[in-house]
Amino acid sequence: MPPSTAATVQVMPLRVVLRRFTATVSLATVVLAGGCALLLLRQAQVSDAATARTLRHEAVGVGASGLLLTFVVLLAVRITGRVLLARIDQVRDTAMMVAQHQIPDLIRKLQQGHEVDTNLLPRVTGQRDELGAINDALARLAQHAADAAWLVHKERDGFDRFAGVAATRSLLAAHGALDGLDQVQRRSDLGVEAKGRLAAVDARVTLLRRHLENLLLLANGVIPHPHSEPVPVGNVMLDTVGESGAPQRIQLEFGPDAWVVPEAAGALTHLLAELADNALTFSHGDFPVTLRCLATGNGVAFEVEDRGLGLRDERLAELAERLKAAPLFAEIAASEQMGLFVVGRLAAQLGLSVTLSRSRYAGLCVVVHVPANLLTQAPRAAAQPAAASAPRPERQPVPAPAPREPVRDSEPPVPLASRRRARPAPEPLLPPSGASSVPQPSTVPQASNVPQASNVRQSSNVTKPSYASKPSNAPRAGTALTEDGLPQRVPGSHMATALREQTDTPRPRQLGFTVDQRSAEQIGNLFDHYPTVEESQ
Amino acid sequence: MNQLFNTLPNTVTTTADPTRYDLLRNSLQHTPGIEALVLLSNDGLPIAAYGVDEAEAQRITAMCSGMASLTAQMAGAVDGAGVLHTLVTMERRTVVMSACGPDSALACVLDSRAHVGLAMREIVDRARSFADHLGTLPRFQAASH
């Protein structure tokens, strides 16, 4: 509001001013006319009859014309006031609506990337009078404001696209670098030191890839998904560890046996890696960050918990805000860390809910709930029991040797989205039957290690297919070799051929017990009076 | 009831997921007088054992196999068709053997003072609930897992 020069003057509405002015003028006219008439009448009393009559006539005339004049003035003021006030009100209403609703709504919508309709803004009418000019000025102002907001939106959109293209190109380059590194890492003639250095470079490039994906996400893009098959949640967790900045500090607690749809797996991994990195950054270097997976009523939940310093409530609320709205670049730039913005964007894309809360150890605990529509059944080929629930914790960044199609140099460029890459992700946990299987360490995390009622059902689901699985031809001892050419023991291969191979002879049915078809109650009743030792003695 | 029972470890290492046998043990803890249980395959190998050490489990398994073979002969001799349960009642212990899942049998060692009817009810009921998960795979399948 511009500073008022007459701050002491009471500003009153035009309507009231006009009304008072009219009343004053009318009163003055009436008083004047009445006074004149009275004066004439008094003169008439003191003069002779003829003059008195004339004077009385004049008094009546003066009084009547005074009343008429008052009436005319009242009428004129009233009509003018009506017309003027109506137009002023109209201009005022338009101005209020534009300033309070239309322009703010328009700017907000443009910021969120929605379409806007500028037809509702006031238009230039071309009226010549003062109020018409004010109206036109208002219309032009509104148009300029809308244009400015649109320009900002176009700029932002253009920057989004520019950043998206730049990020995609860089991402392609990073993927190429990772592929190249991968091939080099698979060579057998490397020394330990060279391998270690390559692994370090690999970790750096992976980090680079993640930052580029962040850029792509914040530029309103969608990150490529590297998987084409459903991914077990255990693998998602391992990928998360591989992508995070300090893999050795992340403690994993494996949970239920669930599979994430391939389209969501990459994004989910990225989201968890961001959260894990956040937790790693804000907790002391000696403390681990726990990443656990739990079954919930509708889907699964991932929990990232750190033992950091924790946050004040208002800061927590502020961070929770970041997860909700699409941020402006100014907001992203203002905060030194953009991880939570990325998390918010990914959560919105996938339809996840991310909740921040104080952890039990005073740090931060983030719960990511993955709804059931992002989960799927295990692929048929991988529906084997033991390993399905037993992801192998693999900490070394070099992937274990596993069957992988050789990458030729003359390979045609593959679109980014269809590239299979989960780095430095553990290779598929379930080696296809007949392939060289890696011995499982004894500390295999089991689905049912987590004491939870629902796991009973979970693990039973896991074990069921084992009866239906078709016989696999287990290789004989010594046929499986590691990449260094060393023989690798294959579990079960030590058994005699007769035990190992399927024979056509049916197993004798009379061996063992026959299943009693009666109910447990009936069987119990049969033995109810079975003598116990005390009774017989 | 035997609360200690559900903390006893499985003394027989099997290739498959050992925790599923713990479920059987936990649910059998309310069986009156239960002291030990051995889950065995019908071809005479112990799968899981609680309350006995591995050597004992091996011996119990071997003897159960022998008895199963004997009782099968008996069934043939008297035209009894399949053998449903075998009870061996001794002065201090009672052993109950029953089917438990495809190609597996369950042997439970009970205190002889316990109520056998109740024990049978529990054992049969539990064995039936977990039957699908406690069966023995054919060896050629088990080998690949």
Image (cartoon, rainbow, N blue to C red):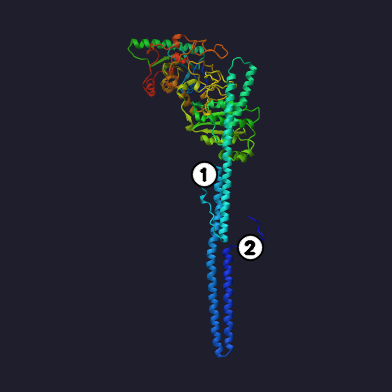
Answer yes or no: is residue A434 visible.
yes
| Residue A54, percent from left and from top | 55, 86
The residue that appears at 51% across and 47% down in the rendered structure is A117
The quadrant in which the N terminus of chain A is found is bottom right
The quadrant in which the C terminus of chain A is found is top left
Q: Do the residues labelled 2 and 1 touch (CB within 8 Å)?
A: no
Query: How crowded is the residue under tag 2: few (<14 C-alpha within 10 Å), some, or many (20+)?
Result: few
| Residue matched to label 1 | A115
Mark 2–mark 1 Cα distance, whole angstroms, equals 45 Å
| Residue matched to label 2 | A10
Judge whether A17 appears above or below A462 on screen.
Answer: below
Residue at disc 2, secondary structure: loop
The three-letter amino acid code for the residue at tag 1 is Glu
| Residue A145, percent from left and from top | 58, 49
Q: Is residue B42 left or right of residue A452?
A: left
The three-letter amino acid code for the residue at tag 2 is Gln
Q: Nearer the viewer, residue B13 or A122?
A: A122
The quadrant where residue A240 appears: top right
In primary-sequence order, the first of circles 2 and 1 is 2
Circle 1 chain: A
Q: Which mark is residue A338?
A: none
